[in-house]
Image: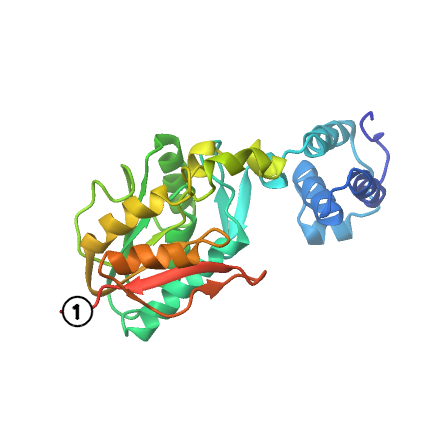
């Protein structure tokens, strides 16, 4: 379909785009249309409301159609926009990073709960985020813990540049450091908190993922090996050695993996913090444990 004609109003263009998305089976058609029009016209929600009757220029119509074509081809809106909000923080993306997902906020919630339960949230803390990607988990925690500093690790240099850029944009670069290594292999303890959202998709299952994930997220950040647990075996063993007494380890789990992750944690000498934290869909999503003081 050709670009919407210049002279079409913003409101008409938005409704027409939503209808196109809906007819193509996109569940979030209304939201996607609003986000893409906002980006194409550089308008926030208030601007789109107040300027609803304004007509699109030729340049705006062409830019909007380019965005629409990408979305109709299966590209996620976050990839088109180059950013995604997580924990209320706007984060830039790159081809080397996953799109942060609301499910992962469960890790932040459980980590903060464990810190507060241990009486540690009000003192200076040292945090490590293993496989940091965009820096989402680490930066969310630093935004909540004014006395904390943290290290984000990733094996991919481009991901680390993205995370460092996000830290700078959020005014957190003074408390965040980023190191290229495999999980915690280059770190020295002790840490008060270690968090991670590692690759956990079984290698054989990647081909069956939704195309928005399979075709646009980096496979290195998805592939958890034959049983999906390769990353946990590495990072739990490394993390257990780097935690200080009473410190916490919190990881994201794939569907049905929480029990196996708990077993790996207890085998590493950690004490489970309680039942896993479920996400909004009821899936056991965040698993936490502590290093019990001797």
Residue farthest along the left direction in this orientation: 294
Where residue 127 appears, as percent x and y from the top left, is: 28, 55
Q: Nearer the viewer, residue 264 or 133?
A: 264
State which quarter of the image contains the C terminus. Answer: bottom left
- Is residue 143 visible to the viewer in this orientation of the structure? no
Q: How many marks?
A: 1
Question: Which residue is tagged 1?
Answer: 293
The answer to whether 72 appears left or right of 167 in the picture is right
**85 left or right of 1 in image:** left
What residue is at 17 percent from the left and 48 percent from the top? 188
Q: In the shown orientation, is residue 138 left or right of residue 285?
A: left
Q: Is residue 43 visible?
A: yes
Question: Where residue 279 appears, x then y in whole percent?
Answer: 53, 61
Q: Examine the rendered structure and indicate whether residue 93 appears above or below residue 172.
A: above
Residue extending furthest toward the top: 2
Q: Tell me which residue sits at (23%, 48%) in the image.
A: 238
- Tell me what residue is drawn at x 38 percent, y 66 percent: 112
Q: Secondary structure at mark 1?
A: loop
Residues packed near mark 1 inside 10 Å, few (<14), some (14 to 19) or many (20 plus) = few
Pick the residue in front: 86 or 64: 86
């Amino acid at each position: 379909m050709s670009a919407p004609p210049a002279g079409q109003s913003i409101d008409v263009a938005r409704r027409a785009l939503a209808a196109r998305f809906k007819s193509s089976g996109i569940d979030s058609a209304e939201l996607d249309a609003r986000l893409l029009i906002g980006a194409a016209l550089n308008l926030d929600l208030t601007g789109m409301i107040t300027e609803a009757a304004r007509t699109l220029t030729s340049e705006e119509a062409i830019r909007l159609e380019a965005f629409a074509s990408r979305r109709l081809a299966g590209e996620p809106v976050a990839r088109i926009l180059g950013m995604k909000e997580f924990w209320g923080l706007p984060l830039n993306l790159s081809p080397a990073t996953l799109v942060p997902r609301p499910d992962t906020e469960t890790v932040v919630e459980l980590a903060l709960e464990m810190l507060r339960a241990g009486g540690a949230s009000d003192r200076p803390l040292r945090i490590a985020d293993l496989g940091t990607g965009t820096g989402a988990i680490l930066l969310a925690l630093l935004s909540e813990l004014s006395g904390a500093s943290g290290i984000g690790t990733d094996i991919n240099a481009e991901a680390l540049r993205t995370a460092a850029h996000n830290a700078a944009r959020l005014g957190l670069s003074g408390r965040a450091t980023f190191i290229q290594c495999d999980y915690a292999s280059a770190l020295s303890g002790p840490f008060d908190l270690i968090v991670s959202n590692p690759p956990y998709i079984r290698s054989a299952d990647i081909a069956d993922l939704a195309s928005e994930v399979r075709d646009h997220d980096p496979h290195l950040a998805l592939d958890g090996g034959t049983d999906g647990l390769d990353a946990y075996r590495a990072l739990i063993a490394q993390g257990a050695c780097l935690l200080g007494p009473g410190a916490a380890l919190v990881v994201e789990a794939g569907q049905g993996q929480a029990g196996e992750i708990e077993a790996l944690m207890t085998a590493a000498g950690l004490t489970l913090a309680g039942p896993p934290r479920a996400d909004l869909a009821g899936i056991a999503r965040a698993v936490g444990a502590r290093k019990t003081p001797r």
